[in-house]
Every structure is written in structure tokens, then in C-alpha cells.
Amino acid sequence: MTVYANPGTPGAVMSYKGRYDNYIGGKYVAPSSGEYFENITPVTGQVFCEVARGNAKDVDMAVAAGWKAFETWGKTSVTERAIILNKIADRMEANLELLAVAETWDNGKAVRETMAADIPLAIDHFRYFAGAIRAQEGSIGELDDNTVAYHFHEPLGVVGQIIPWNFPILMAVWKLAPALAAGNCIVLKPAEQTPASIHVLMELIEDLIPAGVLNIVNGFGIEAGAPLASHNNIRKIAFTGETTTGRLIMQYASENLIPVTLELGGKSPNIFFEDVASSKDAYYEKAQEGFTMFALNQGEVCTCPSRALVAKPIFDGFMSDGIARVGKIIQGNPLDTNTMMGAQASNDQLEKILSYIDIGKQEGAKLLCGGERADLGGDLSGGYYVQPTVFEGKNSMRIFQEEIFGPVLSVTSFKDYDEAISIANDTLYGLGAGVWSRSGDTAYRAGRAIQAGRVWTNTYHQYPAHAAFGGYKQSGIGRENHKMMLDHYQQTKNLLVSYAEGPMGFF
């Protein structure tokens, strides 16, 4: 067990600065308005730094800096770009504890997750796309003896990226790594709820990235995000966040006819078929852990398995074991490596979760555990903690249909395969899903039948770089991760070349 000291206190592995400006053109620049906003740690509910409140003028400066840098960066060899991405990964790996603690303090999540998942995954994504860009090839098509079609991959130019607050560094890297690998320059807007940890990363790696290639403008959505998404010199916008905001981003981007990738909300089903409980073995324990995965990252995951569908013949026994397992979740100081579930990212989010818990009670759902705010005492009393909560009810209830984005699980039963698939697909969303079965046939058929972009089979919450991630229906457009992401940040140049000596004969 390790308990990391609060940032800025004696023995701490890192300290935040008192103030962070925007990062534009390779240097920190004060916001044009001169305004800053307070940044609160969810761990204690206390302000720990100030962050620039950017606006359209700051976005303009960042976009201009990006285009200036693109003149060189866009022509940099893939070898050189790959080397830089690998150096970034090495620098992050050497500062793993520092980045993990920084993210925990900014977001409130348990440091065991940032240490074991968030930061290592971010590191691996840089290395993956460093390799992917080296391996990417164009194509040559021989149309006839005298005519050849060449296809080249070219970067888009300056792209805008807007990231969410649930994985401040990892979600940034999901977008940064392929965009940089492809040769683009970037204007990044972090979430206003978690704006500081990305600057800790930036300060670590700024000597590795040419000035203007990566620019960061902090601020609120309407003041900085909207100007970025609607900017007439942005060649693409990538957004991760709420579905309602995604619609606005799409409208903004349509003004300039630029491509958009949207990774939006979800209400993911986690299906446990009858054969899961045929034996109380290691596989059953694995399935029980899968049931409890709704509490990972305090439930603040777009693919959170927030709906559990359990076969009726095993329902009572499986649920009894599942509730017992949820009861073993350790809540406490997020900087303690024994803590399994930390703080919600903001007071607003905490209030939203508590309001949905109240809605579940009013709808008549059966509360199986949790259901209250958690007071952890001492300095943590001011933090934003809620008990892991499980309801039993019907899929028509709001707590089954609406994204809560917190550690709230809604459970129902199903009588057979067809009903399981029907309930699973009875949602506006289609981002993630889980299927648990000892039968390869059942698992395969269910995985294909569920309308979701990512279906975990006998596992959950794995996010490797080489696996495509994205949604169906109102969960988004486009994909993240996998080498296909290079295509999202490139355009194809075709050179159609005639080597014939004489004219075609039309004129």
C-alpha cells in the first residue's frame, strides 16, 4: 500500500503551479481577456490552481500558430514524427507516478487506476501510432500500360480537439497521437472541470514538440469550444462528450463543411447468460468482477456497463454474489493505492448522480445497495463522493434509459436469448456492451446482434490501442484508436499520371 502525499505538500511527487495560461506557439500566453477561473480538486473540494479563461481571440491565435508550424511539420518525415512520439512515450513512462498523481488530483479518480491503466495506456497509444505511421503505405494502380494512379496520404492541416473530464490525459492522447503521427497541428481544448493535468504533461514534453504543433486553449464550452468548432481555418474537429453537446459541435462544423468525429454518450448493457453460473469457478469470479465494473472510474465512463441483464434462472444467486462483491469496493483517499473508487469529477456531477438516484427511488426501482452520498471524513468530507449504487427495475425506467455517468447500476432479468438482445438494443445509444457466456456460439451471436460499436466478450473495460472504438446510433460518428484513425486525420491525394507520348485524340 502507498498513500501519495497531496500535490504541493511535503513529500509529494508533484506540485501544481498556482496558475496556468494558454499554451500557444510553443510558449505560455496569458488569456486575451486577462480572466482566469478556479480549478477545484474533487478529492477535497478545495481550489488548487487558476486556469486561463480563453475565448475566440485565443483560439484565433492558436489556429494561426498551428498553420505557421504546419508549413514544416506537415512535411516532416514519418520517421521523424515516429521518433518524436516514441520520445514522448519514454518521457511519460519516466514520469509515470507524477502524471498519475496529477490526474488523480485533477479528476478525483483512484490513483491505482491512473497508475495501472490511464497513464500506461496513454504511453502505449503514442508508441502504437509511432509504429502505425511507419507501417502505413500509399498505393499505385496501373490503369493501363501508359497510365498510373498514385495515392498518397496527406495531413489535413490544423485540427481542433475537444476532450472530456473523465480521462483528462488518456482522452487527450487518444486524439493527439494519431493526429500528430499523421502530420497535423492541433488546437486542443481541455474540459473546464479538469483543465490542469494536461498542462503537467505539456510541461514534460514541450521540448520534444516543435513550437506551434500542439496548442492548448483552456476555457468554457461556449467561450472557447464553440469558436474552435466553428473556426473557418480548422480542417477537422474531434469531440468526446455528451450527446447533446455533440449535436452542437456537428452544427458548428457544418458551417465550414469539415469532417467530424464524435464519441458521445452510452447506456451499455452487460449481459450474463445462464451458463455463467454453471460452476462457481474462476470464470464465475471473472463474471462477478465484470458485473462490478460499473464502478470503474466512479462510473464516469461513456461505456460504463450501467445496465446489467441477468438470466432469470440464475438471477437470485448471481445477484446475491454480485451485491456482496459491490460491498467489498473500497472507498477512501484517491491517493491511496488501496482505494478502488475515488471522487466524482465535480460537484455538478455529484449532484446529477444523486438526482438520478432519487429518480430511481421515485420510479419504484428496488434499491439493492448504496443510494447515498459518501462522507469519508477529515479533509475528504468536502470531496465529491457517492456510494456505489445498484437498483433492480425495468428497462423502461429513466435510470435504465438515460446516461447517469456515475456508479449507478440498473439491473433487470431476461427469460431467453431473444429477450436479452431486445432489452440490450432498447436504447438510444450504442457505444459499448458486454456479453458473458461459456458458450462460444452464444457469445458470438450476441456480440453480432447487439447494436454497439464495442462488444466486450467475457471481459470489460479494456481499451487497447489496436482495437477500434466508437458508437452506433446516438453514441457518435467515426472511431478512435486502431490504425484506421490515421485515415480520420488524413486526406487522400491522387495523382493520375499519363506516360503516353501522344495526345488522347479528343481535340
Image (spheres, grey):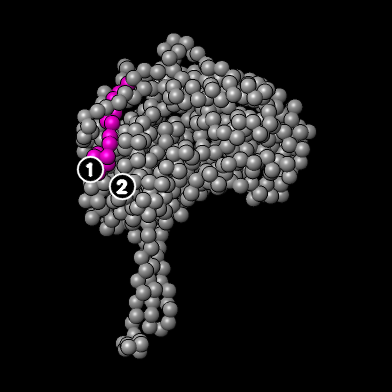
- Give the number of the mark in front: 2 or 1: 2
Label annotation for residue 231: 2
Q: Residue furthest top?
A: 378
Residue 398 horizontal/vertical position (percent): 61, 31
**Going 45% across and 13% down the picture, which residue do you hit?**
381
Badge 1 element: helix
**Going 61% across and 40% down the picture, which residue do you hit?**
427
**Mark 2 and 1 residues: CB-CB less than 8 Å, in contact?**
no
Q: Can residue 177 be seen at all in this image of the molecule?
A: no
Decide: is 377 above or below 137.
above
Badge 2 element: loop
Q: Can residue 270 be seen at all in this image of the molecule?
A: yes
Quadrant housing residue 387: top right
Q: Is residue 154 left or right of residue 388?
A: left
Q: Which residues are magenta?
A: 48-61
Decide: is 174 above or below 151.
above
In the image, residue 377 lies in the stretch drawn in magenta:
no
Tell me the crowding category of disc 1: few under 14, some 14 to 19, or many 20 or more residues within 10 angstroms, Cα based. some
Give the residue type at disc 2.
His
